Amino acid sequence: MKMKTFTGMIATVLATGALLAGCGATDNTASGNETSSTAGGENKQPTYTFRLAESHPADYPTTLGDKRFAELVNQKTNGRIKIEVFPSSQLGEEKAVIEQVQLGAIEFTRVSTGPLAEFNKAFGVFSLPYIFESEEHEWNFLNGPDAQKLLDGLSSSKFMGLAYYDSGARSFYTREPVKSIEDLKGMKIRVIQNKVNIDLMNALGASATPMPYGDVFNALQTGVIDGAENNWPSYYTSKHYEQAKNIIVDSHQRVPEVLMVSQVTWDKLSDEDKKAIKEAAAESVAYQREQWKKFEKEAEDTVRAAGVTVTEVSDLMPWQEAVKPMIEKYRPDYKEVLDAIENAKNK
Ligand code: GTR
């Protein structure tokens, strides 16, 4: 299936649609379609229609979180702010979307902290392997002040970070069976493009092949790469499991997602609207996490039933030992946040 071509076509159609809309009577500004309603001489607040870019399908847990967020914003602003969610990479692949959000051409997005690290180095910490020992540990940290500081720091990259969403743990999957860390040696593994991921693959003796998510299916099919890595829901919905039928559950990373808005858009909003958006984002998290839990299990069950070979890792020690030097290499850069992550273990 030429998924990439199909997505590309949708993106072109939508981009054309947006251009045409821009030619109409509405004021299609960079921060959304703003209509100031001053009817009857009253000084009414403006209404907006914004776009939110999402790379996953319409029923994926992050998309459900985005939609809940959009509904809550709409409710809290009495229908004045409408956020339209565009799933399935309709507005472009993740990195291109982040660039557009930086410019204010797309207002909102949900992205992984993996690609975000190329735009804001502090987020590279989440690509370090085995820094969280469980989901609970990860969320103790994400719900705390140091994770909030990271979101606030996004303003230096022209974004406003609104909330974290769950993305479980990532593991390797390959065309040929991988039963131990040794089997990964020399394999070409697709990674999300960022510096930490490349060092991680080197530490494991594999070779990192960065490429957009939407290209991975074809690359697996044609043998351009030997494998990739992701969480259960993405392994399933991307159909990578049809090409890479072996998964080794080493859970090397927990890379959360981020819901964010362009600083260009943010700066145009009233304090009241900013408050409504922040509250809506915070309130959507519990729902997203609930959906995640459900779908993570469903995805795992479905790929197992489809005949995928699952190798559980009973002893993570060799994996953790292999990556220790690379973590130490990054420790000076991420010292403060790594200490905060360590402290979140016992909360
Ligand atoms: C998923 C993540 C996506 C994307 C993808 C990838 O888990 O939700 O945003 O980053 O991984 O591997 O590119």
Image (spheres, rainbow, N blue to C red):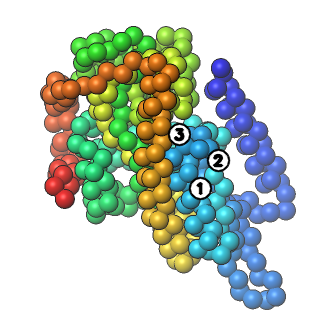
Task: Confirm if mark 3 falls within 8 A of ligand 1.
Answer: yes
Amino acid under disc 2: Phe
**Relative depth, front residue between 244 and 226:** 244
Q: Which residue is mark 3?
A: 94
- 265 relative position to 185: left or right: right
Amino acid under disc 3: Glu
Any part of residue 156 in sight: no
Q: Earlier in the sequence, mark 2 or mark 1?
A: 1
Q: Are marks 2 and 3 in contact (CB under 8 Å)?
A: no
Closer to the eye: label 2 or 3:
2
Whole-percent x, y for residue 103 in the image: 57, 51
- 179 relative position to 210: left or right: left
- Residue 67 got which mark? 1
Q: Quadrant of the C terminus?
A: bottom left
User: Which residue is rendered at x = 48% and y = 42% of the image?
Assistant: 295
Q: Residues within 10 Å of mark 2 (few under 14, many from 20)?
A: many
Q: Which residue is mark 2?
A: 86
Indicate the secondary structure of the residue bearing disc 2.
strand
User: Which residue is rendered at x = 78% and y = 54% of the image?
Assistant: 22
- Compared with residue 1, is residue 120 higher up or lower down, i.e. above or below? below
- Compared with residue 45, is residue 335 higher up or lower down, i.e. above or below? above
Amino acid under disc 1: Lys
Any part of residue 299 in sight: yes
Closer to the eye: label 1 or 3:
1
